[in-house]
Amino acid sequence: MIEFRHVYKSFGDLVVLDDVSCEIPEGKITMIIGPSGTGKSVFIKLMVGIVKPDSGDVIVDGHVISSLPTHELYEVRKKFGVLFQDGALFDSMSVGENVAFPLREHTRLSNAEISRIVSDKLTSVGMPNSECRLPSELSGGMKKRAALARAIVMEPDIVVFDEPSSALDPVTADSIDNLILEMQQRLQCTFVVVSHDIESTFKIADYIGMLWQGKLIAFGEKDKIMNMNNDVLRQFFSRRAQGPIQIVPPICKDLDEAGSRGAGNGRDVSSKK
Amino acid sequence: MEVVNVQVLGLFGYLFAEVGRYAYFVAETFRNLFYKKFYFLNLIDEMNTIGSRSLLVLAPVSVFVGMNLCVEGFIFFKKFGAQNLVGMFVAVANIRELSPLIAGLITGAKAGTQMAARIATMRITQQVDAMEVIGVNPYAYMIIPRVIGAILVMPFLVVVAYFVSTLSAYLVAVYQLGLNGDAFMNLVFANITMQDMYKGMIKGAVFGGIIATVSCYSGYTASGGARGVGAATNLAVVRMSTAVVFFNIFLTEWMFM
């Protein structure tokens, strides 16, 4: 189980996470949502120990991540499979070598066994016979599939996704959502997905946590969170620019005015200025 | 005036902070030398890359340096009617100063920038993070092979630079300046010892360490997209060429004074 206990993280004067506490349930899909720049990716980096909290603890299966010595941290990281935002495939290696990389580093399997496992994993993410292709030859969706194959090749206890559907067309994004659901049902392990895609959240989440202004303002089962009477959640779920979440104040102000006048879209308003 | 003082203090503060961060990076690199796994194949690959890439530029540059050195020496010694001593000048200046410096600067420009750009790209596209999450130590996997590779290859590049520049100086001395070839070579062999050669090679090894750690540090701390890769590469060239020339003074004083 993963637990955040009063975690505080800042970069200079910018407070990214402020007293964040939660327990991520085992064997479920937990979505961490929130507007851009609210610390969702930092949340993941804290979880896998790439970033250390200023105060508070991140605990993974009883290990306090921030206080582990380097060699133990690398051991705990073997519990994780991480799919980064753009896949983060090693561009000097082929797809097959990328997927085989964790196996070559952490197991003593023969080349034949590694090839078989790599082939199985690539087939399971819908990329059969693509071992020899280079990451530069793949589309965005294919990169994410290949990165997912690499993330699950060691059969980790926890799989973490950083914006799995960002920069993808709706059909590919939906296929990635289906893949996440299918993988979770097959592997029965803990999935943590960071996203701001509402459709994906409603489709695949078992649990939802909402980050806003460095705080985890809501965390719980999907139905409970969806029915909460909270202005921030309602604005986020309904994809409205008007509300407590003010991303770019001047534009939002314009849109507010336009909305109250019954005018058209933001472009019309700005062109009138 | 106060604004200027604040700017100067800010610059010194930045420099001190950078040197501190670089020192920490070097300390981490050495600490991870004893990590449980050593990537020997990566070391071989890096040695091949550093050597082959640098050699292609170093060899022709060394030809020109040798030719230039011979002509300059000839012009200077001719004032005293001692133009036959040009072989001595070429031998000493080459092995003690020019060959290690030229080898260092060319390797830095060729292999060092490649290291910085490669690692910066990996950092910015989260490949370094991915490596860490997979449970692979990035220092052990990609920094240490580059540093050791540069330290091992650089002494041989110094020797190559020395032989190529001395040969080109000999050809200019004999065929352009009309000096006696045997006298030239006798002065070369009479004025350098194997110790000079070893010291030149030690300089090369130190420069190799500086080039690799500075390049890797510049790449490893890169941020900010494609612009960050460019900035890291640019910083690597400036830092490593300054450091090589700066440390050359101390090495010369330590080894030859």
Image: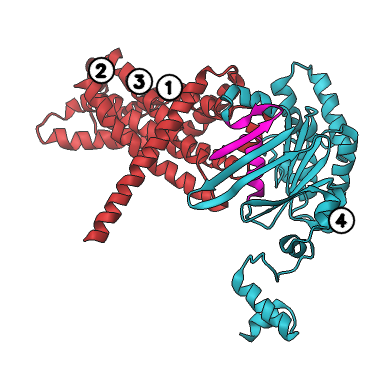
Chain colours: A cyan, B red
Secondary structure of the residue carrying tag 4 is: helix
Q: Amino acid at mark 3?
A: Ile
- On the picture, is B179 further left or further right than A10? left
Secondary structure of the residue carrying tag 3 is: helix
Q: Place residue B173 in its image quadrant.
A: top left
The answer to whether marks 1 and 2 sit on the same chain is: yes
Q: On the rendered image, what quadrant is the N terminus of chain A found in?
A: top right
Dot 2 and dot 4 residues touching (CB under 8 Å) = no
Tell us which disc is closer to us: 1 or 4: 4
Which badge, 1 or 3, comes first in the chain's sequence?
Answer: 1
Q: Which residue is mark 3?
A: B202
Q: Amino acid at mark 4?
A: Val
Q: Amino acid at mark 1?
A: Phe
Q: CA distance from mark 4 to mark 3?
A: 60 Å
Range covered by the magenta-colored residues: A39-66
Secondary structure of the residue carrying tag 1 is: helix
Chain letter of mark 2 equals: B
Dot 1 and dot 3 residues touching (CB under 8 Å) = no
Tell us which disc is closer to us: 2 or 4: 4
- On the picture, is A197 further left or further right than A52? right
| Residue appearing at x 88%, y 41% in the figure | A126
